[in-house]
Amino acid sequence: MSTALESRPINAAVRSASPPVRRRPPRLAGDILAWLSGIGLGLVIALVIQAESLGALRAPGGVLTAGGRLFGFVGTYFLLLMVVLVARVPWLERQVGQERLVRWHRRIAPWALILILAHVLFITLGYAQAAKTGALRQLWTFLASYPDMITAAVGTVLLVVAGAASIRAARRRMKYETWWAVHMYTYLALALSFGHQLATGTPFIGHPLTRAFWTVLWLATAGGVVAFRVLLPVWRNLRHGLTVSEVYEEASGVYSVILSGRRLDRLKVAGGQYFQWRFLTPCLWWHSHPYSLSAMPRPPYLRLTVKVVGDQTAAVSKLRPGTHVLIEGPYGAFTKEARTGNRVALIAAGVGITPVRALLEDLPAGVDVVAIHRASTPDELVLHKEFAQIIERKGGSLHRLVGPREHVPVNAQTLGRLVPDIATRDVYVCGPQSFTKRVVGAARRLGTPHEQIHHELFTF
């Protein structure tokens, strides 16, 4: 197979005359969220501790019981925080990005489950010690005699099931829809445990401030989920009424879907963002998958471009005009707002060009652009002609890399040659996961700061 490495500097005079990078203050959304979460955790611990007494701690099983209460409240707080991170709160999605939010969600998840299980163990042992009975007998007493304890037990089992399904090895063997359905158990588990917490939580007894704090915390979390994961998508779909207008083949196995709708000029979406799409056909209505817009909206039309890699994407390529479409979003921080300066490097492989092409179109005038478009064969250079045209209009330069990976690699040496000032640029990367990791690693080795590298991986 032939290989090619083609560089196409376009309007180099404009590039060389561009002003130096002007650094802007980094976004503080992630730091603010971390600080608020830390303050909330401190309040949770303080409210539990202030409800304890020396007499209770000195009683038989007192220390175990107190520890169990602390574990339970902190574990529940972590569960609520996990829900908030993936509640699709718009400003969090824009400022922080879904990938980072999901990564934080996954890091907290094991600790939340461990603390909840530790709560069950320590409370059971503490009460058993106080009653001078066995742990299993005490556990049965809880289930048979204490209010809301059976629902709490069911909730704990559901948490364990959801946790097991989230283990990477198990997640890889599941379809997205199966994993999503199992993951919904977390919401049910939290709902079932709410009554138990209010009914039997000793820190609530005689402590109205604690009860008010937790009630507000629960209601705010539930309200956020309902507002942003239910009501907002319903309102947006009723407002825009999207339907399929046309489907055509861009390249071998790659299809663009044109959708039409109402008031799309009011759809606030940035180049590089994506939606969760649900096509209302008999075999697709229950699927929801992330696809980026491959161009900025042209009211009354939107365009997305997908590569056929399985049954679901193959079915998308066969959509008929008039098919109704539901969306959730837009989501993602892979946008012009993530820039720290006015120089960017756009690096895309294969169908990963779709969000990069929309992002390029959305960049302000005066931004210095260098782009790399990578593909194994010329036929896989999806949307390359229009991508090149936009680059030319913006006075940037475009490098086309075509050939097998072993002959035309995208590594630190290649990036250093094609983008010698990469350390001073914001680097946007989109492509297969392995490609993205290689490019990010190469950019870091060339001195590009972490905050100047932007990418999102659509994994669950």
Image (spheres, rainbow, N blue to C red):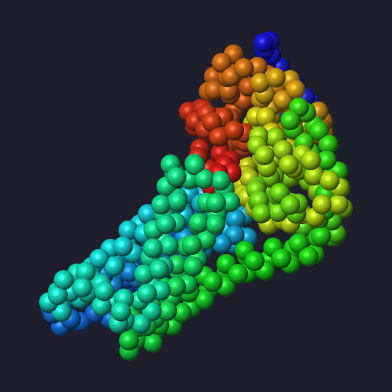
Percent across and percent down for residue 249 are 81, 33
Q: Residue at x 33, y 69 (%)?
A: 72
Percent across and percent down for residue 112 are 37, 60
Q: Quadrant of residue 14?
A: top right
- Left or right placement of residue 414 versus residue 211 in this view: right
Return the residue nearer the eye: 109 or 330: 109
Q: Residue at x 54, y 19 (%)?
A: 413
Percent across and percent down for residue 243 are 83, 53
As drawn, which residue projects farthest toward the top? Answer: 2
- Report whether residue 454 is seen: no
Q: Is residue 361 above or below residue 157?
A: above
Q: Is residue 255 above or below residue 58?
A: above
Q: Quadrant of residue 379?
A: top right
Q: Residue at x 54, y 57 (%)?
A: 181
Q: Is residue 90 above or below residue 179?
A: below
Q: Quadrant of residue 48?
A: bottom left
- Left or right placement of residue 369 versus residue 301 in this view: left
Return the residue nearer the eye: 194 or 356: 194
| Quadrant where the N terminus is found in the figure | top right
Q: Residue at x 44, y 56 (%)?
A: 162
- Left or right placement of residue 173 versus residue 90 in this view: left
Q: Is residue 78 above or below residue 333?
A: below
In this figure, what is the number of numbered marks? 0
As drawn, which residue projects farthest toward the bottom? Answer: 206
- Report whether residue 245 is seen: yes
Return the residue nearer the eye: 170 or 72: 170
Percent across and percent down for residue 41 are 38, 67
